[in-house]
Amino acid sequence: MIELHPVTLADKAWIDPIVLAENSPSADYNFGNIFLWDETYCQQVGRLGGRMVVLLRYEHHPFFAWPIGTGDIAPVLEEMGAYAAAEGFPFVLRGVTADHLPIIRGLYGDRCAVTEERDLWDYLYAAEKLDTLAGKHLHGKRNHIHRFEEENDWRFVPLTEELFPACRQVLDQWLASSGENDGDGVYDEYKAICRAFQHYGALGLDGGALLSSGKVVAFSMGEMASADTFDVHFEKADGDITGAFTMINREMVRHIRALHPQVQWINREDDTGRPSLRQSKLSYHPDRMVEKYMAELRI
């Protein structure tokens, strides 16, 4: 029987080992993203055997995340389906990756309706590529770097609590320029980043800040998603400074590679269907995509 409760920081202790066991490059499963976006998704979590069950709500519609972990998944899905039936909502799974589809189809056959969710696909890049920006396709990025270096007295430093107020100024500037538009999730992201500042140490996040003439002009933070993949949760920069975004991207990757030499991939998460964000992520020429699907299962 599923026993669910609202997510708290205390859940990190049992969720982290399950995330490591799943070892997926997806950005959906690590504890940071679960906790930081809780105000938006009103999540409840629980364990069934060696798997994590997460029930989310978005725009008043409940759905389950894929139950990551170890052990036989069939009885876990059965329990989740029974829970949905008892609560009177459709049994819907989201965050289903291409690796999961054969499992679902093998268990449910024609009782499974799958829908591609392109707006939620994660962008994965080889860490070395984002570090060096080598190759003709990234020539423009190197030009941005060179211009930033020529026009700024800059340095990159690890993100610490003392820098949070200055980072908040960059964040507030981003919000003002974006507009408080709940429809495209801008304010939801703002709230998640504020929560990251509040619980940065307890969540074990890694981050960095880019300074120009001693002033913070960009920051980035994230956490390990799998044994070889680092997930960049947030990256914000002063849009009026040419090359600031490109520079924080490169310097953060170099910082992470120094901290975690095993990292081979950088997950820069999805684009939520926002055209400008999609264009930006595609401009770095992703090496892989974590495809995601929604599956409605009939029990």
Image (spheres, rainbow, N blue to C red):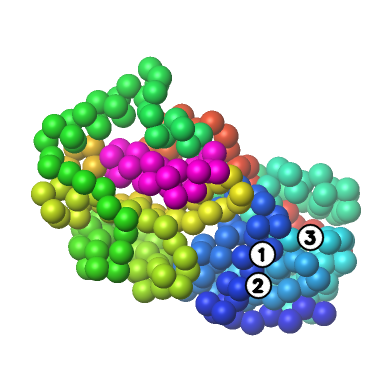
Report whether 241 appears left or right of 139: left
Judging from the image, what secondary structure is the residue with disc 2 in? helix
Amino acid at dot 1: Pro
Q: Write the residue at 62% across / 65% down.
A: 16
Name the residue carrying label 1. 17
Label 3 to label 2: alpha-carbon separation: 13 Å
For disc 2, the marked residue is 14
Using the numbered discs, state the Cα–Cα distance from disc 1 to disc 3 in whole angstroms.
Answer: 10 Å
Q: Position of residue 217 (x, y in %)?
A: 20, 51
Which of disc 2 and disc 3 is earlier in sequence?
2
Q: Are marks 2 and 1 in contact (CB under 8 Å)?
A: yes
Nearer to us: label 1 or label 3 = 1
- Give the residue at x 42% y 58%: 206
Q: Residues within 10 Å of mark 1 (few under 14, many from 20)?
A: few
On the question of residue 71 being in view, the answer is: yes
Q: Where does the magenta region start and end?
A: 245-274
Q: Secondary structure at mark 3?
A: strand
Q: Closer to the N terminus: mark 1 or mark 3?
A: 1
